[in-house]
Amino acid sequence: MTLHEFNTLPRESLIAELSKCCGARAWVQRMLPLIPADNLVELLEDAESQWWLCNEEDWKEAFTHHPKIGDLDSLKKKFANTAVWASGEQSGVNTAKDEILNALAEGNRLYEEKFGYIFIVCASGKSAEEMLGMLNERLKNNPEDEIRIAADEQNKITLLRLEKLLQ
């Protein structure tokens, strides 16, 4: 879709497209008055600034719109509207060995148990082994630091998806 097409979408369609990029309703609502955007750079800058105006509950809401890293069944079923993007973003797990996938599943369980939300990472270009390493490192964080790191990862995903939307 072009920027012009995006800028001229009916409100409900615009909400749907923004929601594919970030599942936080507050972020979507914050973005609506900023559209039309003059260019992609402005749109990305606005997206990032509005993300950081959201609160922790908004961030956690956005996290619920992602499958767990390596959970391919979840990707296909629950997240069908973003499955193409998410599967590309998580392509590093497609060729991972079972032991790595099992370790990711266990790490995801431990992470969610500790922090109360899924492990979120901008997975584009990362192998399953890299993501597992990041997961294991981030499990060492305290909750206050981790929520900021997770929010930053969500921000990266949102910006990447906006760029993909407008290609």
Image (cartoon, rainbow, N blue to C red):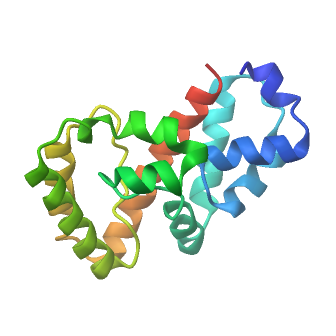
Position of 135 relative to 32 (above/below): below
Residue 17 relative to residue 144: left or right: right
Residue 120's spot in the image, x, y percent?
37, 57
Position of 154 relative to 156 (above/below): below
Instruction: Decide if residue 152 is in sight here.
Output: no
What quarter of the picture does the C terminus occupy?
top right
Point 45% across, 42% down: residue: 86
Residue 49's spot in the image, x, y percent?
61, 48
Position of 80 relative to 167 (above/below): below
Residue 47 relative to residue 114: left or right: right
Point 20% across, 66% down: residue: 107
Residue 84 relative to residue 126: left or right: right
- In which quadrant of the rendered view does residue 9 lie? top right
- Across the whole image, how many numbered discs are drawn on residues? 0
What quarter of the picture does the N terminus occupy?
top right
Which one is in front, 158 or 45?
158
Point 41% across, 39% down: residue: 87
Which one is in front, 148 or 93?
93
Which one is in front, 3 or 89?
89
